[in-house]
Amino acid sequence: MPDKVMTEDAVAAEITSGMTIGIGGWGSRRKPMSMVRSILRSDVDDLHVVSYGGPDVGILCAAGKVRKVTYGFVSLDSIPLEPHFRAARQSATVDFTELDEGAFYLGLMAAAHRVPFYPTRAGLGSAMLSENPDLRTVVSPYDDGEELVAIPALEMDVALIHMNRADRAGNGQFLGPDLYFDDLFAMAGRRTYMSAEKIVPTEQFLAEGSVHTIRIPRIHVDGVVEAPMGAHFTECPPDYGRDEAFQREYAATAKEAEAWTDFRAQWLDLPSHDAYRQKLLERSNTAESRTP
Amino acid sequence: MTPDDPATIDEICITALAEAFRGDGEVLCNPMGPVPVIAGRLARATFEPDLMLTDTIAYAVSGNLPLGGDPSDFTVEAYMPFRSVFDQVWSGKRHVVMGASQIDRHGNQNFAAIGPYRKPKAQLLGLRGAPGNLINHATTYWVPNQARAFATTVDVVSGPGYDKLAELGDSARFFEIRRVVTNLGAYDFETADHTMRLRSVHPGVEIDRIVEATPFDLTIPADVPLSRLPDAEDLRLIREVFDRNGVRKSEFR
């Protein structure tokens, strides 16, 4: 089997300005944050981000890396609307296509299956269709003749996903309650990069979880990054939950430019994921020493 | 609070929301937010035993799971990750409860944005799953502050209302807004032109207050019933099983 292990910075080097980047996970759950920060460190911009968005979308928008977002929602879960994305929408600094959450799944599936669209009723009568002139309808070629929304394939140059476990060849395993749509992102990406909490020998997968959890086959994965705490501050159960205190601090930085600049310097523009982990360790030690 | 204390407005609203599920039988009852979640669980515990309900994460769970309860203390009857929930949406065997920042007399609902959609004054939740929900299965709305949400027109249509159906023809055949429940009363669209009708008034609410909190023409039948008061078993379940910590009260502050 091939060996696809690489670093976050090597992944970022595969991304060029103007590309469409799909990001797996869901809201503030199992987001490939260490790879998102590697994009932040690089000089690419003008990106089109495709995501069930969380802080991945907010951070890239706030950093000025984004031309357009295609999304089913952008949320931090415990904070219903991503504050940096809210700012981007209200100032109209990014273009966007907003899809019904389920319609977004159909768009991912169309890209994964290499068909131009999947039909659905979702969107009929709503702003999803009336406010998005790029979305079109199709008429059923069968006797029913029903008019349906054609959700276009969400094609992407690069897909980024984060798993609990991976092997060096690019097989991936989720151990939490939900895969979300990461298998479809992996298939939809012309190139797909997968970070994982831990790289394990292939034969160890079944000791980690049931066979049903080995859901990312290596044929769709071009690179593997070992990134413990790679989804932080989003949740990555059972390895760790969401760091709600950290997320609150992040969310508060949308209120003023200076707070964002400070946060970015302190937490995002670090030279590597190792440096980020080291800072997290210092932070938790400080928090513990404060506890009487 | 014991089951003997009289019902408060939050419990009256929960009971009115539970009533929206009456007759649903074996469908996925998928309420969003604490008050609707308690209502769905109450409906199953009392008069609609075949409903399927999730832990709001990825499991359909049987038994009376408290708000924020650990599903592993209960019996998981089906695995229902988000992908499966969308499949249920399209199958039609689902009844959802969503919020509404604005709702008009046709049932057009907005929780997406205030102001122009492309450059909103205030970005709210976005369209979320509303477009797909409305066109595929029954929807009920929960509005904790009627005066704030009832509107002559909505800024953005997240969930379409009945006036949009004419343009959609057969594609809208699964559309149903079952109920709108507010802090003042319960509403439906069972009128000739499918505009909003007052279905019941919550005990203690004057009709004048309802009229004041409604900026559009509302059908008010001559004889409006009172919303059902929760009985002792309803109150026991709400107070001592589903929501011992009173999370439901926070939506009424």
Image (cartoon, coloured by chain):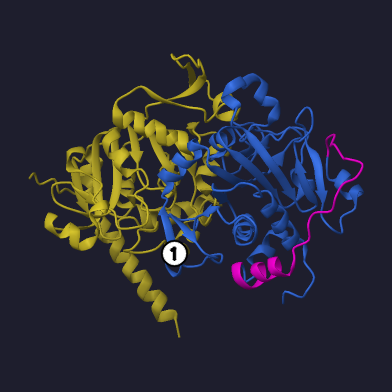
Position of B43 compared to A265: left or right? right
Q: In the rendered image, which quarter is residue B102 located in?
A: top right
| Magenta-drawn stretch, dominant element (helix, strand or loop) | loop
- Residue density around tag 1, few if under 14, some if 14–19, many if 20 or more, within 10 Å: few
Quarter containing the C terminus of chain A: bottom left
Position of A9 compared to B90: left or right? left
| Residue found 68% across the figure and 48% down from its top | B20
Residue B218 among those drawn in magenta: yes
| Residue A218: x %, y % from top left | 17, 43
Instruction: Identify whether A95 is placed above or below A143.
Output: below
* Protein chain holding label 1: B
Q: Which residue type carries mark 1? A: Thr
Position of A211 compared to A51: left or right? left
Highlighted magenta segment, given as a residue range:
B215-242
Quarter containing the N terminus of chain A: top left
| Residue A163: x %, y % from top left | 28, 52
| Residue found 68% across the figure and 59% down from its top | B251
Q: Which residue is mark 1?
A: B75
Q: Nearer the viewer, residue B9 or B157?
A: B9
Chain assigned yellow: A
Q: Nearer the viewer, residue A211 or A109?
A: A211
Instruction: Identify whether A126 is placed above or below B64.
Output: above
Position of B4 compared to A150: left or right? right
Residue A117 among those drawn in magenta: no
Q: In the rendered image, which quarter is residue A211 located in?
A: bottom left
| Residue found 67% across the figure and 45% down from its top | B141
Q: Nearer the viewer, residue A61 or A184?
A: A184
Mark yes or no: residue A177 visible: yes
| Residue A213: x %, y % from top left | 27, 53
Chain assigned blue: B
| Residue B170: x %, y % from top left | 59, 22
